Image (cartoon, helix red, strand yellow):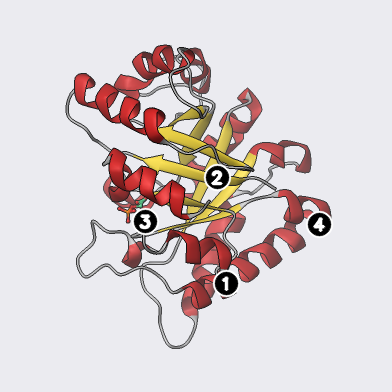
């Protein structure tokens, strides 16, 4: 199975020129990694531009582009939304769905996330579906919370559509923009990855659970990335802050080589 390293730029950088500069910086120096796919998820507004750029081969590696959200209808009176079809047209192969910042700031419910996942998978986009608890309690309630997010998000999704599905475990308390954030430990992550894989196993069966990558996100940087993959057994990483500097992101990629 391939490792996926996903750069989630969130609402950054604040100009198209800076976005191109960052993108070029990554492409120019990113190492060629065996069995690794690099996916850059810029704001919608830069997707088209970066997709034009990515067609010009100026580095050793191929990168894919992803969006940070999508709507579930293909057209119509939905002010401010963007459809799976539109995303594909402007060069996105992937889409992040259910990020905790969207769940919180835009009150995205499990039901909405489920509709988005279905529509995106049906359209042929590859989905990076985010789940993760707000806090870790002693009693282990957070396990139920994560299980519920996984099952609700994947409700009614047929096995045939899971080929393009990836899960990303991002505990909210570990995301660098949150106060007091700290990365998970590889040991605890390993337990969570096993737990999520078990949920996938019971929901979809052996084959799908084996083929569905589960990533980790939350304060990942060039110093801890390797451990999350090797000790934590994550099949990739979702990287926020450290993906906003070409130098850090390239170092991170080199570190997992
Ligand atoms: P972070 O963000 O790497 O800055 O913690 C990860 C994310 O929110 O996807």
Q: CA distance from mark 4 to mark 3?
A: 35 Å
Residue 4 image label = 2
Residue contact at pointers 4 and 2, CB within 8 angstroms:
no
Taking 204 as reference, is 105 left or right?
A: left
Residue 222 image label = 3
Q: Residues within 10 Å of mark 4 (few under 14, many from 20)?
A: few
Taking 26 as reference, is 75 left or right?
A: right
Q: Quadrant of residue 184?
A: bottom left
| Mark 4 vs mark 3: in front | 3
Badge 3 marks a residue whose secondary structure is loop
- In terms of sequence position, does the residue under pointer 3 or pointer 2 come before the other? 2
Q: Residue at x 58, y 75 (%)?
A: 191
Q: Which residue is mark 1?
A: 190
Q: Which residue is mark 4?
A: 205
Badge 4 marks a residue whose secondary structure is loop
| Mark 3 vs mark 1: in front | 3
Mark 2 vs ligand 1: CB below 8 Å: no
Residue nearest the viewer, comparing 57 with 37: 57
């Amino acid at each position: 199975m391939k490792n996926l390293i996903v750069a989630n730029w969130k609402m950054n950088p604040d100009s198209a020129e800076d976005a191109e500069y960052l993108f070029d910086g990554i492409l120019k120096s990113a190492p060629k990694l065996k069995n690794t796919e690099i996916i850059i998820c810029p704001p919608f507004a830069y997707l088209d531009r970066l997709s034009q750029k990515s067609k010009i081969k100026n580095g050793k590696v191929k990168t894919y582009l992803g969006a940070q959200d999508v709507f579930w209808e293909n057209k119509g009176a939905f002010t401010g939304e963007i459809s799976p079809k539109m995303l594909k047209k402007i060069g996105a192969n992937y889409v992040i769905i259910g990020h905790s910042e969207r769940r919180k700031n835009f009150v995205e419910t499990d039901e909405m996330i489920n509709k988005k996942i279905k529509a995106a998978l049906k359209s042929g986009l590859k989905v990076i579906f985010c789940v993760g608890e707000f806090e870790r309690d002693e009693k282990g309630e957070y396990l139920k919370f994560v299980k519920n997010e996984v099952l609700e998000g994947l409700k009614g999704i047929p096995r045939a559509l899971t080929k393009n599905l990836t899960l990303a475990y991002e505990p909210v308390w570990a995301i660098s923009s949150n106060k007091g954030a700290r990365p998970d430990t590889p040991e605890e992550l390993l337990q969570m990855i096993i737990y999520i894989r078990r949920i996938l196993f019971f929901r979809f069966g052996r084959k799908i659970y084996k083929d569905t990558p589960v990533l980790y996100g939350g304060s990942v940087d060039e110093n801890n990335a390797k451990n999350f993959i090797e000790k934590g057994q994550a099949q990739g990483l979702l990287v926020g802050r450290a993906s906003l500097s070409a130098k850090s992101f390239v170092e991170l990629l080199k570190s997992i080589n």
